[in-house]
């Protein structure tokens, strides 16, 4: 199996981005080619790390991150029971985080560090991909733009698997391009494993394979007679590795049925995907222009950037997968398109087409100016991404209120539907917490995230003189609204309301026995 090398006559008629007969050797070999590879990888990686790592533990965890902590902190036996009932698609992530927590602990910064590093490396991979597709300056600009997108900071600072889905989608694309250029059993096997890793990170990210089909089509068109067979074998291997998880996950799809998509979700998609309207609108507008100049890679990038949102939107009522964070892996395609459009302004994307140093200097200035300008515009969004989510309850402050006023023998109860019990378990994990007096069956016993409360609340409340109520009910009646009627009657009969502390979307109330 040998890579196809165009003749001199063929290269004379190539599109600007196709590259000459020595372009691949120059970009991937030793000497200046290797130096440029390190350049386009390291600068975006460092830029992304500079955005993501500062303040990594500042923003408090929100409910999905509490789920990560809870599942990853379980014993292997209890984790197995959990994923047998729910969240089987996150099994590899939870298992990895279980091992990570054993080493690094479970502080907010420690929980988020793996994702932050994955996002930083993703920026470097964007740079390498742009360099391989187009030119060094194109890759460098694409990687730097990716690094300063506010959503990259937001989800780089999140203990969820979306950064890994982005990382492995990029890695799979790079490995496919290498396998098509320099075929070998090792490279195709690595590509298959990258596909599996992408699926294990998030199933939606596997839609990147649609764009991969185009690269295989181009290879076959160039005369590679077995590329499509090798691709089919590698893709089937990768898919077969993830199939058991996918098969079991289809039976748990009801857990995301809450995600009902509306037209407003579509119109606000650019803002929610990129982190702000100005950054999302600018990238998508220039990205459309990039489709016109991306040459043979336009179909790949279009399929990567556009197809996943379209497919998840049209199937939203059935699959409920149209969520911006599920589609984070499409941002690299958009930044590559923007970089292709902008670098085209100063000449052909093929580095061998340049003559002299003048164009190179102009290109370097362009990369620096655009990256700096976009970073300046995106900076407020990056700052906002590090703040507590405005619609999430302030459980950290609630925990402080309880820890400061808790006395021996106190109990704690919960009301609302915002995972109050799990959140308070995290925030009070290293402090003495009041007993969860109404919990009869633990989440571990249920094989779920939720506990079962006492069917005879009078019995469970016996001997408790003071309760801490943590409620996310905001209608002024934190105890009664939404609570089990029998439980509410038992509490009202025996307890009276005392001190009440109202925080962001959560109320802490002391209930004292009458």
Image (cartoon, helix red, strand yellow):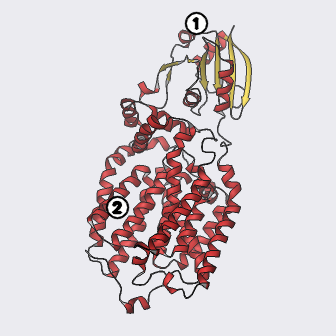
Q: In this view, does 363 lie to the left or right of 216?
A: right
Q: Is residue 341 left or right of residue 513?
A: left
Residue wearing tag 1: 463
Q: In this view, does 448 lie above or below 30?
A: above
Give the foreground label among 2 and 1: 2
Q: How far apart are marks 2 and 1 (CA)?
A: 62 Å
Q: Is residue 68 above or below residue 435?
A: below
Q: Nearer the viewer, residue 496 or 41?
A: 41
Q: Nearer the viewer, residue 368 or 164?
A: 368
> Which quadrant is home to the C terminus?
top right
Q: Position of residue 438 (x, y in %)?
A: 54, 18
Residue pictured at 54% horizontal, 83% vertical: 348
Instruction: Please say whether residue 180 is visible from this viewpoint.
Output: yes
Of the residues under marks 2 and 1, which one precedes in the sequence?
Answer: 2
Secondary element type, mark 2:
helix
Residue wearing tag 2: 191
Q: In which quarter of the image is residue 447?
A: top left
Q: Where is residue 448 in the image (x, y as percent from the top left)?
A: 44, 31
Residue pictured at 41% horizontal, 65% vertical: 174
> Which quadrant is home to the N terminus?
bottom left
Q: In this view, does 101 lie to the left or right of 243?
A: right
Q: Where is residue 251 in the image (x, y as percent from the top left)?
A: 38, 42
Residue pictured at 42% horizontal, 65% vertical: 173
């Amino acid at each position: 199996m040998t890579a196809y090398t165009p003749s001199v006559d063929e290269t004379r008629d190539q599109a600007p981005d196709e590259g000459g007969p020595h372009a691949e050797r120059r970009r991937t070999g030793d000497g200046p080619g290797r130096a440029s590879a390190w350049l386009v990888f390291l600068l975006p990686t460092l830029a992304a790390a500079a955005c993501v790592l500062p303040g990594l533990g500042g923003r408090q965890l929100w409910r999905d991150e509490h789920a990560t902590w809870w599942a990853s902190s379980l014993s292997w036996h209890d984790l197995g029971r959990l994923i047998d009932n729910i969240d089987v698609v996150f099994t590899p992530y939870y298992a990895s985080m279980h091992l990570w927590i054993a080493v690094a602990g479970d502080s907010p910064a420690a929980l988020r560090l793996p994702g932050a590093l994955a996002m930083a490396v993703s920026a470097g991979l964007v740079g390498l991909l742009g360099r391989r597709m187009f030119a060094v300056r194109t890759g460098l600009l694409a990687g730097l733009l990716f690094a300063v997108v506010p959503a990259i900071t937001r989800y780089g600072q999140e203990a969820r698997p979306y950064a890994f889905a982005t990382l492995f989608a990029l890695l799979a694309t790079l490995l496919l391009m290498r396998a098509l250029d320099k075929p070998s059993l090792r490279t195709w096997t690595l590509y298959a494993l990258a596909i599996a890793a992408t699926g294990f990170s998030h199933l939606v990210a596997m839609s990147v394979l649609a764009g991969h089909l185009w690269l295989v089509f181009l290879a076959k068109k160039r005369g590679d007679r077995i590329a499509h067979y090798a691709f089919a074998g590698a893709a089937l291997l990768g898919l077969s590795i993830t199939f058991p998880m996918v098969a079991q996950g289809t039976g748990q799809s009801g857990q995301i049925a809450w995600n009902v998509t509306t037209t407003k979700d579509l119109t606000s998609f650019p803002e929610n995907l990129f982190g702000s309207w100005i950054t999302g609108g600018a990238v998508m507008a220039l990205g459309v222009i990039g489709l016109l100049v991306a040459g043979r890679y336009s179909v790949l990038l279009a399929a990567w950037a556009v197809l996943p949102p379209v497919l998840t939107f049209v199937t939203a009522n059935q699959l409920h997968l149209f969520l911006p964070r599920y589609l984070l892996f499409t941002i690299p395609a958009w930044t590559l398109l923007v970089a292709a459009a902008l670098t085209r302004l100063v000449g052909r994307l093929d580095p061998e087409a340049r003559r002299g140093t003048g164009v190179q200097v102009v290109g370097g200035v362009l990369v620096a100016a655009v990256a700096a300008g976009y970073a300046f515009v995106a900076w407020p969004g990056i700052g906002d991404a590090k703040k507590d989510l405005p619609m999430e309850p302030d459980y950290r402050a609630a925990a402080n209120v309880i820890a400061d006023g808790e006395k021996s023998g106190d109990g704690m109860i919960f009301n609302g539907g915002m995972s109050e019990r799990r959140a308070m378990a995290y925030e009070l994990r290293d402090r003495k917490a009041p007993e969860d007096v109404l919990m009869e069956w633990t989440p571990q016993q249920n094989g779920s995230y939720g506990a079962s409360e006492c069917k005879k609340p009078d019995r469970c409340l016996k001997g408790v003189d003071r309760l801490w109520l943590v409620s996310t009910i905001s209608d002024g009646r934190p105890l009664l609204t939404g609570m089990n009627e029998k439980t509410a009657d038992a509490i009202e009969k025996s307890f009276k309301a005392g001190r009440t502390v109202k925080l962001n979307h959560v109320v802490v109330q002391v209930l004292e026995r009458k």
